[in-house]
Image (cartoon, rainbow, N blue to C red):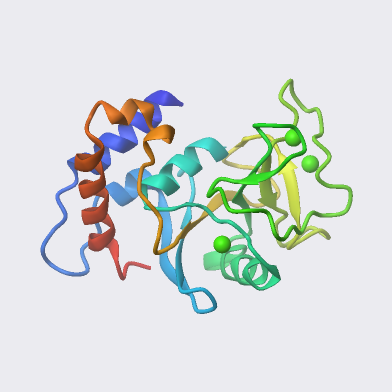
Amino acid sequence: MKRSLISVLFAVLATQVPANAGAVPAALDALHVIAGPITNPANAHDYYLIDAGENDFDWRDAEQKAILLGGHLASINDAAENEWVYSTFSNFAGIDRTLAIGLTDTALENHFQWSTGEPVTFTAWGAGEPNNLEVGPEGQDYAFFFQPTTTLRGTWDDAGPIFEANFYLGKPAGVVEVTASAIPLPPALWPGVATLGIAWVARAVTSLRRGIKGYV
Ligand SMILES: [Ca+2]
Ligand SMILES: [Ca+2]
Ligand SMILES: [Ca+2]
């Protein structure tokens, strides 16, 4: 995982944002941005849909990409945001998708927290979830929406971090939420990046976000 994240980082840093409006920076390919920014009128936050291209989808990589975009995987703070996120992205471009959101209990089993640090004020677990199903030694610590063709559509499942690229129940993707107060690249989350200079990286990311504004 480390190698792929580093390659993403360098792709971002190497990006020269073109002056001409409407051009799509090459770094978007590395971040696998499918769509965005799309603004939720209810909270004025911008959202992106990202995936892992042809690779297996890893929740942890998606969260790091979200940070590079200036946010985190989406925090679902109420029923209205749940409905908006699911209806906007679960069948985006006509493709059924299994959507990652920013909820995880990696720190303490069955104590789910948003990666933004916001308090958990709303949940929409599917029947019987979260069940921490022991499919591997780690259990299930990462939240995803069930995708549209399941009877549990619109509700959440705890799952392992990795979904195969060709997962048979909907292409895995992540929903990124950017708030006005989001601080790109918190040093605590990017210890390796700190040595490269946080300010330099933050400037590059800000330029990138400016460059892709309007790209949907
Ligand atoms: Ca939110
Ligand atoms: Ca768990
Ligand atoms: Ca589960």
Furthest toward the front, the residue is 119
Picture quadrant where residue 197 is located: top left
Q: Residue at x 33, y 37 (%)?
A: 8
**Residue 204: x %, y % from top left:** 21, 47
Of the four image quadrants, the one with ligand 1 is: bottom right
**Residue 7: x %, y % from top left:** 31, 31
Observer-nearest residue: 103 or 48?
103
Q: Is residue 59 left or right of residue 142?
A: left
Seen in the picture, residue 44 relative to 169 is either above or below; the reply is below
Q: Is residue 175 left or right of residue 138?
A: left
Q: Is residue 200 left or right of residue 170?
A: left
Q: Residue at x 73, y 43 (%)?
A: 158
Seen in the picture, residue 164 relative to 170 is either above or below; the reply is above
Observer-nearest residue: 114 or 102?
114
Picture quadrant where residue 23 is located: bottom left
Furthest toward the top, the residue is 137
Q: Residue at x 67, y 71 (%)?
A: 83
- In the rendered image, is residue 11 in sight? yes
**Residue 175: x %, y % from top left:** 53, 56
**Residue 119: x %, y % from top left:** 64, 53
Seen in the picture, residue 19 relative to 71 is either above or below; the reply is below
Furthest toward the bottom, the residue is 41
Q: Residue at x 80, y 35 (%)?
A: 132
Q: Is residue 194 left or right of residue 77?
A: left
- In the rendered image, is residue 58 in sight? no
Observer-nearest residue: 33 or 81?
81
